[in-house]
Amino acid sequence: PLYVDSTLNGYPVIRFDGVNNNFMLGSHYLFADNTKTGITFIAVVKSTADRTYTLANLLDFGTPEAGLGGYVFEYDINDAGSLWHKPGVYDYGRVTYSHSKGSAYVIYTGVIKFGVAGYSTNVVRLNGAQVVSSTSSYALTQFTAAEIDESATRTGSSGPVSIAMQSKLLNTTRNLQGDIAEMLWYSSALSSTDAHTIEAFLGQKYGITLDQ
């Protein structure tokens, strides 16, 4: 990736070309056990391309596909979403939203809540406002090695925490083309109040007007 100084309100960004640029965290896995309420991922991001095959991956871990396990937070020039699968379980959590932000910088927030009233819930927020949510009939209670097909390097059915691309073996149709200024990950499903506090701080820092 390319480091570009003084790009967003005087702050630098990391620019991804949508083909070869990415980051991997190797064996540094982002798990959350059953003492947690879920996970939250926040990114200040700009997309400059649509992914016709699927949404672009902001952060992908494992293999969130039917029968396998992992989670992914997604954003491109037209759509935002999140997805998770558990190994051996074909029920899953999936949410997508068609937005009108285009190639502007946005504050993306994705929340996956564990076992809310017997269900797991996916929430996506853009610029401080919740834009979509959905529930799964499967009550996901944690993200550990039992739920995620993790590995320090990419294989055909597992992979490391990956930024701006797919976790398992390279599929460039899912790579992010655009910029990331900042990313935050929490082993907790942040409340809307707590998420908005962070979004307000990021909005002030990067000069992004919140929608709510």
Image (spheres, rainbow, N blue to C red):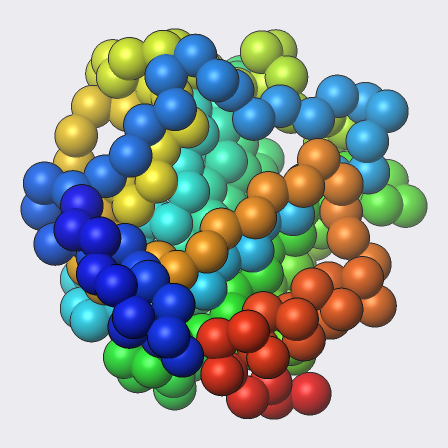
Depicted 1 relative to depicted 85: above or below: below
Depicted 35 relative to depicted 150: above or below: below
Residue 150, visible in the rendered structure:
yes
Quarter of the view holding residue 151: top left
Q: Quadrant of the C terminus?
A: bottom right
Residue 176 horizontal side relative to residue 119, left or right: left
Q: What is the count of numbered marks?
A: 0
Q: Nearer the viewer, residue 53 or 191?
A: 191
Tell me the residue at 22%/53% (across/down): 3
Residue 195 location in percent, x, y? 73, 63
Tell me the residue at 26%/17% (across/down): 154
Residue 157 location in percent, x, y? 31, 16
Tell me the residue at 28%/24% (across/down): 168
Residue 138 horizontal side relative to residue 90, left or right: right
**Seen from this angle, which residue lies furthest right?**
117
Quarter of the view holding residue 98: bottom left
Residue 169 horizontal side relative to residue 119, left or right: left
Depicted 155 relative to depicted 96: above or below: above
